[in-house]
Amino acid sequence: MAGVSEQAYSPEERRAVYRVISERRDMRRFAPDGVVSEDVLARLLQAAHAAPSVGLMQPWRFVRITDDALRRRIHALVDEERPLTAAALGDRAEEFMALKVEGILECAELFVVGLCDDRDRHVFGRRTLPQMDLASVSCAIQNLWLAARSE
C-alpha cells in the first residue's frame, strides 16, 4: 500500500483542487457555443462514477436528455413542484422561489440523475444504512459539478 508521501500532490495541484471547490457554481453557460464535446461529457461522467459509495453500490443512473420536447416536460414538472417544495420550507419559501429553473431549458447539456432504490438490495451497507444511497448519489453529483467547473 502506498504511503501518504507517495500520493502527495504538488502545491499547484492542491491549489487547483481547492479553487475548483470554492468556485463551484451552477453551470448554466458551460460552453460558449452551446456544445459540449463527447470527450468532455465522458470525463464528467467518469468523474461522477469515481465518487465514493458504500459497498461500491453506485446506486445512480445518469440519463442524458437530448430531446427538446422531453427537456420542456422536465422543466414543466420541476416548475410544478416548486411551490410544493417552497411550502415545505417555511421561512425560506420566498428565497427558494427566487431560484430560477430556466437553466433546464437553456443549458448546453441536461442530465437527470436517478437513484435506484431497490437495485442490489444486499450490497454491503444498503441493508443497515439505507440512507447511504442518497449520500452516494450526492457525492456522484458533486464530482460531476466539480469536474464541469474544472473544464
Image (tube, rainbow, N blue to C red):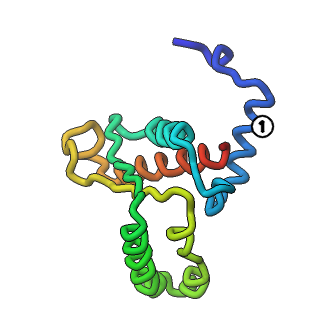
Report the side of 105 relative to 118 (left or right): right
Q: Position of residue 81 (x, y in %)?
A: 40, 80
Residue tagged 1: 15
Q: Amino acid at mark 1?
A: Arg
Quarter of the image with the C terminus in it: top right
Q: Quadrant of residue 75?
A: bottom left
Residue at disc 1, secondary structure: helix
At a point 80% along the width and 28% down the height, the residue shown is 11
At a point 34% along the width and 54% down the height, the residue shown is 131
Mark 1, other Cα within 10 Å: few <14 / some 14–19 / many ≥20: few
| Figure check: 69 above or below 29 | below
At a point 70% along the width and 46% down the height, the residue shown is 20
Report the side of 30 relative to 123 (left or right): right
Q: Position of residue 103 (x, y in %)?
A: 56, 69
Q: Position of residue 129 (x, y in %)?
A: 31, 48
Q: Which residue lies most toward the right here?
A: 11
